[in-house]
Amino acid sequence: MELRHLQHFVAVAEDQHFTRAAERLMVSQSGLSASIRALERELQTPLFVRTTRRVTLTEAGRALLGEAERILAQVRSAHEAVAAVQGVLRGTLALGTEQCIAGVHVAGLLAAFRRRHPDVEIRLRQAGSGALAEEVAAGRLDLAFAYRTQADTDQLRSVSLTGEPMTVLCHPTHRLASGGAPVTPEELGGEVFVDFHPDWGPRRTTDTAFAAAGVRRTVALEVNDVHSLLDLVDENLGIAVVPRHFRHKREALTALPVKGTGEAVYETVALLPPPQATSPAARALMALLEQGTHEGP
């Protein structure tokens, strides 16, 4: 099994199309097809279901994809490690992050990294914490800044960044705003909620807290960005339970502490592969983070 066969296989799996994959790889379509056939012959099973419009993975292809991505990530890390020993950091830094993550100024950190390591290409992906954890574990991302979604495994470890309580945000004319006192999940049970997609860290924290309190809530307005959430609350269309630092993004809204949620704390972490699989670029980024040199120019 040759590395180029795995590279070709992953490209076709990602594009779901031989022509587009061949163009991206800058190889002929016939050569790409021959490479995939050679891999299928070696594994003695079809890897794709081919139609006139697209190709999809077979069950065997899905099983191979994760392993192929991990192998290619390890090969890339090996090349980068040798370059790092030679005193030059090259290659790619593939970073994932949730929106408005606490404990790290992502833009400032990346700017400091680029100044320090100009030969490294930076790639950034924004997504929910569950998806980011899967991407790091599969080797598609070098690291991610996210909400802690699970305990450490042999494919994924976490470095704590910060923790903070959850806060209710509501319109100043809302019935809760007049009291200004901390509220419990029981007092919020009948409210209309604005919240994020279930894969997002704040949503997971709130769902866990309300489930632990035995309170059912209705998320009528589901969004995928912070500003849309704040806009909806600002129009008094619902309330939101969010990490405390969100209150500074819209000072006109009323912020109320949440009590009676036990250990429901929004904890943000850096998600990384095991130390032996962590790329030199990821280690360099974490070193800058630990030094506090990420506030931008």
Image (cartoon, grey):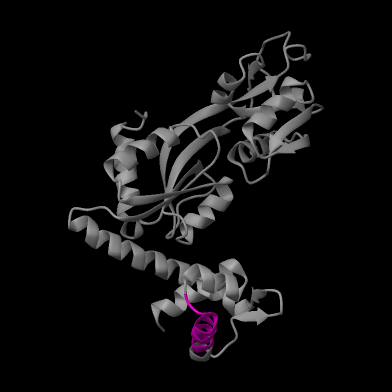
Residue 83 visible? The answer is yes
Q: List x then y, in percent, for residue 276.
A: 31, 59
Residue lying farthest to the right in this orientation = 190
Left/right placement of residue 279 relative to residue 219 reads left
x and y, in percent, of residue 60 in the image: 59, 79
Q: Which part of the image, by quadrant, shows the N terminus?
A: bottom left
Between 117 and 232, the one nearer to me in the picture: 117
Query: Which quadrant of the rendered structure holds the C terminus?
Result: top left
* Quarter holding residue 203: top right
In the rendered structure, the answer to whether residue 253 lies left or right of residue 292 reads right
Task: Report the residue at 37% width, 57% height from top.
Answer: 274
Picture quarter containing residue 239? top right
Q: Is residue 288 depicted above or below 38 in this figure? A: above
Q: Is residue 239 visible?
A: no
- In the rendered image of this protein, does residue 73 appear above or below residue 32? above
Residue 198 is situated, as x and y percent measured from the top left of the image, at 67, 44
- Total number of numbered discs in the rendering: 0
Q: What is the x, y in percent for residue 221?
A: 77, 35
Could you tell me what secondary structure mostly forms the magenta stretch?
A: helix
Viewer-proximal residue, 164 or 45?
45
Residue range highlighted in magenta: 27-39
Residue pictured at 45% horizontal, 41% vertical? 269
Q: Residue at x 68, y 43 (%)?
A: 197
Magenta span contains residue 36: yes
Which quarter of the figure has residue 84? bottom left
| Left or right, residue 51 beside residue 19 | right
Please identify the residue farthest to the top as the structure is shown: 178
Q: Residue sitting at 57 percent across and 66 percent down? A: 14
* Residue 95 included in the magenta stretch of the image: no
Placement of 1 over or under 157, stated as above or below:
below
